[in-house]
Amino acid sequence: MAEAEGVPVRIVRREGSAPPSGVQAVARQWRLTELAHEARRIGAETILLGHTRDDRAETVWMRLTAGADLSGLSAMPPLSPHPLWPEGDGLWIARPLIDQTRAGIRHWLTAQGHDWLDDPSNDNTDFTRVRVRRTLARLRSAGFEGTRLSEVAETTGVIEEGLSAAAAHLLLETIELHPWGGLRLDRDRLNAASAGIRRRAIAAAMAMISGVPLPAPRGVEAIVSGLASGQPATGGGAALTHFKGKFWLVREPGRGALGASSLSPGEAGVWDGRWRVTSGLEGLDIGPLGEDYSAYAGRGSLERVPGLARPTLPALRQGGTVLAVAGLDTPGGVRTGWLGPALAARTLFAGRPPAWFVRAMALKAGETGSRNSSSDAPYLRGPDLETLET
């Protein structure tokens, strides 16, 4: 059908044997990875998936039975970031059929004279989603319309938007961004905020530091407790430390080995989920600075960096020689970019982040460009368009 409409088709198949367990999870991960690769290949930013109102209802039921909180119930929004990081950075998942039921789509196809294919795994009760689908079918026969669960997702999504906006404002008001990838925190203002908003803001700050969107609740609670007590703490790849009379959030040095990556001229890569590097040099490596700074000519600049963060700084090496540290130096022939603002946006917002947040975060990060820097400060509600001075 696509070819008849002049739409190019490319089919990608997974090679190798099926995993012994967790087939659906492995398949989902593989599909998302390949969709990201294909989007990059053809220069697309948005991937359309066929999720329906029924799919969203099933997801809400599964999360309810698993004890999900409010944010977990706002499932499958019409638009969301690609869930993989960093493979999905800058890519979006759109669900144009999320307001349609499965039966309604089949009815429409029949009316148009079209057929469809059913995945045989949809009848395999070894899978949780299939069992949930049958449970909801039995409830429907008893008078409960399962798709009402989709309305729960819509309602909680609206609530989530408000909470996310409040947390985003708190984050912007209580952090100071440093170009090497660290955050100085206003501990007093964070501790004075309401518990739920504070947790969300700290989770976003941790994502900026660790390179991992949506840090685990246990790690967030560890940092929240550290802030409350004024004691050092670690969790989720982030570390809370005291430096020059202030509290800082930095990359946790002991959280797994920070490996090194090699880049060819013209090649771009992401290191530690935190830094995007584009090389114009032969034999460029990016990896952690480590604890021996003697080979770094600019080591005097490290005095501005908390000691706990120094071993995790992104060092650019050529032939074993440290050319520069991203965020502290500007090496010739290499472009670096801290992904912290993008990580914060993915953690805070289910869909596209508001323009006011993107703009305010860019200003905090010291970015320059064609922007209306003289307009009012970020606002709570209303349109995302800024007033331009003429």
Image (cartoon, grey):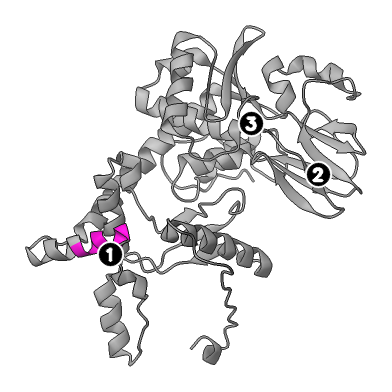
Q: Amino acid at mark 3?
A: Lys
**Above or below 299: residue 218:** below
Where is residue 105? Give x, y as percent.
30, 77
Q: Quadrant of residue 338?
A: top right
* Magenta part of the chain: 127-134
The disc, 3 or 1, on the residue closer to the chain's N-terminal end is 1
* Foreground: disc 2 or disc 1: 1
Identity of the amino acid at label 2? Arg
Residue 129 lies within the magenta run: yes
| Residue tagged 1 | 125
**Does residue 209 appear to the left or right of 276 in the view shown?**
left
Please tell me how crowded label 1 is: few (under 14), some (14-19), or many (20+) other residues with Cα within 10 Å. few
Q: Which residue is mark 2?
A: 335
Magenta span dominant secondary structure: helix
Q: Which mark is residue 364?
A: 3
Q: Residue at x 45, y 67 (%)?
A: 49
